[in-house]
Image (spheres, grey):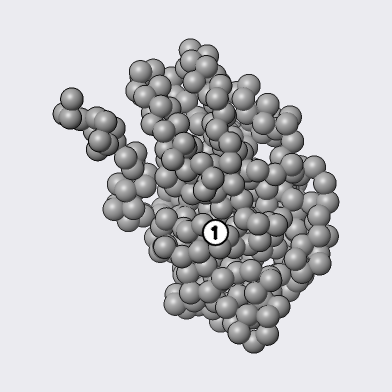
Amino acid sequence: MNKVSEMARLCLSIMRANEMRGYTVKYLNPLAPRDAERAISDSERLVLFGIKDTSQISRQLVQNLRRAPGYVWLTVDTCSFKGRAIDPFRINPLTGRVMTGSSSGSAINVLYGINDLAVGADGGGSVLGPALSCNLFGIVASGIGLTGTRQRISTDELSFVPGIGVISKDIQVALDAVEHLTLKQISTDVINEESLDGVIVGVPARGCLELPTLGDMRENLMRVVGSLERFGVQVKELNLSGCDDRKTALHALSHAFSEVDIVISYEGPIDVWGLGDSVLGELGVTGRRVRQTSGKFLIRAANMSQATSIVLPGTDMACGVVLMAKPGFVTARKALKLAVEIDRGIVRPPLFYRYFRQDPVEADDLFFGGEWF
């Protein structure tokens, strides 16, 4: 894109952000046009980003992104009340259901094209869940030290430090952002040179996990599992029964990381037939049933296991592949490499791409545009 079109895109994003004030936008940076003029002189492509409204994201991390070529901070994004895993005040534009939390506003702003990138905090799936629910890419990099500012207690009384993650429509945009946030070399060019020889990948055994409407999790991973051998990795089956419960999933991941480098699951549809929320899960048989049909499994425990986690949108609505690497920089790079390779083999519906991946609203479609005056 040329500089004129990028500045026009910024203007359209600011207009949309103003329309979403109080809904998905908490604050709109008034200096974004000035920052964009400076950024466009160093980069042909602007990367507009939002920040989740949480003190877990340090000012230093925001500054790391703002100093990167082409990056422009545009919004502070709204999130769910008290960090709930669902957000009853907002609707998922893709599924039409209650929005997944807690990085709810962040994911919606990316899906609508207000921002190219969102930075959020993930305790028990608060970045991975919203990303998957909107068929977006997400990375949470707690496994390489990208974490929040303080410890918290989850709704099910587990102690954890939130991981910091990103949401984007493009896996390369997400990778580059994590590199700028961590100041470590994990960009696409570096990842492409990473070797996968000798990597051990754990996948769910047949019959241990059942997805709402989609059936056996392993069956939904057949194409991915079939492609792993040509990447030079070894596949090991894991018993992940009961991993719709977070404490069970935490135990399963801890045990798995003693045997494998990376765990892969397929999860969803996220919050379509049920709602993955611990508060609801405590409200008797009905609440537990609603939570159990949410389509959320290991994503609820990934950050608490200190994994570096990546979600890749699949071909089904609000579903996708989840990769979780055991803590450490080496395994994180290998997981990111594997994610890039797997993503190349996923063919997604063209209508979704035309509607959400391309600019969803063109200037000529608006009243003050086109041939009106």
Quadrant in which residue 81 is drawn: bottom right
With 118 as the anchor, is 63 left or right in this view?
right
Q: Nearer the viewer, residue 4 or 34?
A: 34
Q: Position of residue 363 (x, y in %)?
A: 29, 32
Residue drawn at the location 65% of the way across and 74% of the way down: 280
Whether residue 110 is situated above or below residue 94 in the rendered picture = above
The residue that label 1 is drawn on is 89
Q: Nearer the viewer, residue 185 or 142?
A: 142
Quadrant in which residue 112 is drawn: top left
Whether residue 287 is situated above or below residue 151 in the rendered picture = below
Q: Nearer the viewer, residue 151 or 240?
A: 151
Instruction: In the displayed orientation, state which residue is furthest to the bottom.
Output: 285
Question: Dividing the image into 4 quarters, which one contains the C terminus?
Answer: top left
Q: Residues within 10 Å of mark 1 (few under 14, many from 20)?
A: few
Whether residue 347 is situated above or below residue 267 in the rendered picture = above
Q: Position of residue 216 (x, y in %)?
A: 50, 77
Residue drawn at the location 58% of the way across and 60% of the way down: 87
Residue drawn at the location 54% of the way across and 59% of the way down: 89
Q: Position of residue 307 (x, y in %)?
A: 71, 53
With 287 as the anchor, is 113 left or right in this view?
left
Instruction: Please indicate, yes or no, whether residue 155 appears anywhere in the rendered image.
Output: yes
Q: Position of residue 34 (x, y in %)?
A: 52, 17
Residue drawn at the location 41% of the way across and 57% of the way down: 94
The amino acid type of the residue labelled 1 equals Phe
In the structure shown, which secondary structural element does the residue marked by tag 1 occupy?
A: strand
Question: Dividing the image into 4 quarters, which one contains the N terminus?
Answer: top left
